[in-house]
Image (tube, helix red, strand yellow):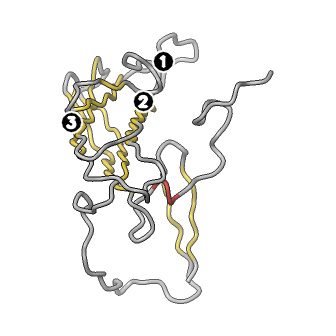
Amino acid sequence: RCRQRTSYYDTAQGFGRVSLLDSLPLRGHNYVSARVVDRTFVEDGKTDAYEVNVVAKGNSCARPELRATLVWADPPVTADCVKCVVNDLDLTVVNQQTGELHYPNGRTSKDDRNNVERVIIHDLHEGASFTVNVEASNLDSAKQYYSLVITWCVVERTTINEPDTPTSAPSSALGPGERLSISLVILILGTTILTIRD
């Protein structure tokens, strides 16, 4: 069966190549800012909110867009479930200037079927301000742990929390020829093992 090609990945295509230059903040190589919230929790009936301010965009921004991706480990369900999400978290992004509400996964309403949700907002402009919301509704437990990654493209680095001077290597630094394995989670692409050689 032939599927129509989409501009972003779908359930059948687009997971093969990861562009770190377009995904992660790499000092001196791109102008991507990232906010990573890992293994925090939201309580049932509560909402966690995160502010994002676009400082500026320029020619060095390959994709002047904001992306917010929410993931969580949902409790197991039976194989014959109809509504299979037990602890429903909802991701929304609000444009503070226009009040426009953005829903995840290309929907026009909240997603109550997936435990991976992503909002993409194209064509950011300088001075734009957004609120990224993670709302817990109808949890089976008192709280649900989640991870959230927000990336956007800026020219000025005032929103990035990086030290200005490099820090010295710790005393436990690797020697020549030693291997380091790192478990790395990149948005919703899964877990991979990365080997760094000196």
* Residue that lies at the very extreme toward the right in this rendered image: 1
Residue at mark 3: 49
Task: Give the label on residue 84, or none.
Answer: 1
Q: Where, by quadrant of the figure, is residue 146 drawn?
A: top left
Taking the spot 78% from the left edge, 24% from the top edge, the residue there is 2
For image coordinates 36% across by 22% down, the residue present is: 88
Q: Nearer the viewer, residue 195 or 127?
A: 127
- 3 or 2: mark nearer the eye: 3
User: Please, what is the three-letter code of the amino acid marked with disc 2?
Assistant: Asp
Specify the quadrant of the image occupied by residue 41: top left
Residue type marked 1: Cys
Q: Which residue is mark 2?
A: 74
Marks 3 and 2, how far apart at CA: 21 Å
Residue 29 position in % (x across, y down): 45, 68
Indicate the position of residue 125 as horizontal and vertical percent values: 31, 43
- Residue 123, placed above or below residue 112: below
- Counting from the top left corner in percent of width and height, residue 8 is at 57, 36
Secondary structure of the residue carrying numbered label 2: loop
Q: Would residue 60 be found to the left or right of residue 127 on screen?
A: right
User: Spatial distance from mark 1 to mark 3, Cα to Cα?
Assistant: 26 Å
Mark 1 secondary-structure assignment: loop
